[in-house]
Image (cartoon, helix red, strand yellow):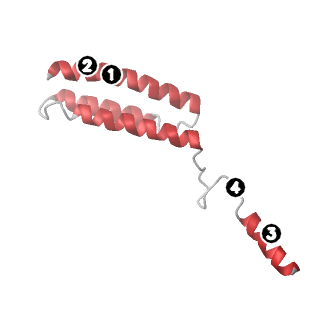
Amino acid sequence: MLGNGMRSASRLYATISSGKDLKGKQFLTLEHFVQRGRALSLWRNIVRAIRKIPPSDSTRQELHTFARGEFERNKYIHDLGHIRYLISTGKTQFDSMKRYIDQMG
């Protein structure tokens, strides 16, 4: 009987997470996961809006390059306050960009 109790105890300890996966990367917290979704949603909205610009227009490529550069530059930010700030700022910039795109069409 003691042997079974020890096995179940070792199973319990085996399920305690260190906060890292097998490759040593940090797991996302729930809040990081939510903010990641918001950032991806913003990126998709930007790409959809840019597609409305005619491909022959150089503005299309410039806007895409700028947006991608901003996302790439900030992809290793982990501070939640800073991430929220960047998403908020990005949405504000996107709104002004979208007004510009709507005026073009």
**Label 1 vs label 3: CA separation?**
55 Å
Q: Does dot 3 land on a helix, a strand or a loop?
A: helix
Closer to the chain start, of discs 4 and 3, is 3
**Label 4 vs label 2: CA separation?**
47 Å
Q: Which residue is mark 2?
A: 99
Disc assigned to residue 47: none
Is 103 left or right of 86, judged from the image as shown? left
x, y percent for residue 8: 78, 72
Marks 2/1 in contact by CB < 8 Å: the verdict is yes
Residue drawn where x is 44% and y is 23% of the image: 89
The amino acid type found where label 4 is placed reads Ser
Q: Which residue is mark 1?
A: 95
Q: Does dot 1 land on a helix, a strand or a loop?
A: helix
**Label 4 vs label 3: CA separation?**
17 Å
Give the quarter of the image for residue 62.
Answer: top left
Is 70 left or right of 52, judged from the image as shown? right
The amino acid type found where label 1 is placed reads Asp
Mark in the foreground, 3 or 2: 3
- Seen from the viewer's position, the closer of residues 74 and 101 is 101
Disc assigned to residue 18: 4
Marks 3/2 in contact by CB < 8 Å: the verdict is no
Marks 4/2 in contact by CB < 8 Å: the verdict is no
**Label 1 vs label 4: CA separation?**
41 Å
Q: Which residue is mark 3?
A: 9
Mark in the foreground, 1 or 3: 3
Is 98 left or right of 88, judged from the image as shown? left
The amino acid type found where label 2 is placed reads Arg
